[in-house]
Every structure is written in C-alpha cells, then in structure tokens.
Image (spheres, rainbow, N blue to C red):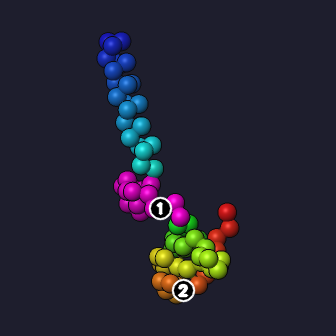
Amino acid sequence: MKKLLIAFTALALLGSVADAKAPCRDAKGKFMTCPPSGIAVATGGGQVSPPDKKGRCHVVVPAPGTKQKKGQLVSCPKG
C-alpha cells in the first residue's frame, strides 16, 4: 500500500511538471504556446508591439470591443 501511494505521488508530481512547462492558457483554459516575449499584453486583451527605433508602439492584435486597428500607434505599456 505504501509503494502504491509513493508511485501515485510521483505520477502526480510528473503531471504538475508538464503544467509548468506550458503556463499559457487560452480563453477556454486549454494549454497553448506562449506569445513571444517581445510582445506585451495591453489592457483589454489586445497586444502591443515592443517600441520600435523611434520609441513608438503599434497594435498587433486589437482588443475586443475597442476601435483599435492593427498597426495603429498607441502608448507603450509601462513595465
């Protein structure tokens, strides 16, 4: 019985390691590949590009429910 409990615990730990490798989830809770580290998530669910050579940021993915368009200039996220 003790060996069975140890084996079950080891399998549970291995499963949690798989969750740690893919920490990004989509809206339905399924695991997905994380976006590139150069893209910051804007408030409202849209995505903003990192600052270009002139220090400007552009909309990569418009936030739902806003009037943003792809490529529009926006203020860069802080942080």
Badge count: 2
Res. 79 image quadrant = bottom right
Judge whether residue 44 can be spotted in this image: no
Please identify the quadrant where the N terminus is shown: top left
Q: Point out the residue furthest to the front here.
A: 53
**Residue at the image position 47 percent from the left and 61 percent from the top:** 36
Q: Nearer the viewer, residue 52 or 73?
A: 52
The answer to whether residue 32 is magenta is: yes
Q: Secondary structure under badge 1? A: loop
Spot occupied by residue 12 in the image (x, y as percentages of width and height): 38, 31
Q: Which mark is residue 36?
A: 1
29 above or below 61? Answer: above
* Residue 79: mark in rendering: none
For the question of whether residue 73 can be seen, the reply is yes
Question: In terms of image quadrants, where is residue 55?
Answer: bottom right
| Amino acid type of the residue tagged 1 in the rendering | Pro
Which residue appears at 52% of the width and 67% of the height?
39
Residue 13 lies, with reference to residue 23, above or below; the image says above
- Left/right of residue 4 with respect to residue 53 in the rendered view: left
Measured as percent of width and height from the top left, residue 71 is found at 50, 84
- Binning the other alpha carbons within 10 Å of mark 2 as few (below 14), some (14 to 19) or many (20 upward) gives few
- Magenta residues span 24-38
Helix, strand or loop at disc 2? loop
Predominant SS along the magenta part: loop
User: Which residue is labeled 2 in the image?
Assistant: 72
Task: Give the x, y percent position of residue 57.
Answer: 59, 77
Q: Position of residue 45 (x, y in %)?
A: 51, 71
- How many other residues sit within 10 Å of disc 1, few (<14), some (14-19) or many (≥20)? few
In whole angstroms, how far apart are the C-alphas of marks 2 and 1?
A: 20 Å
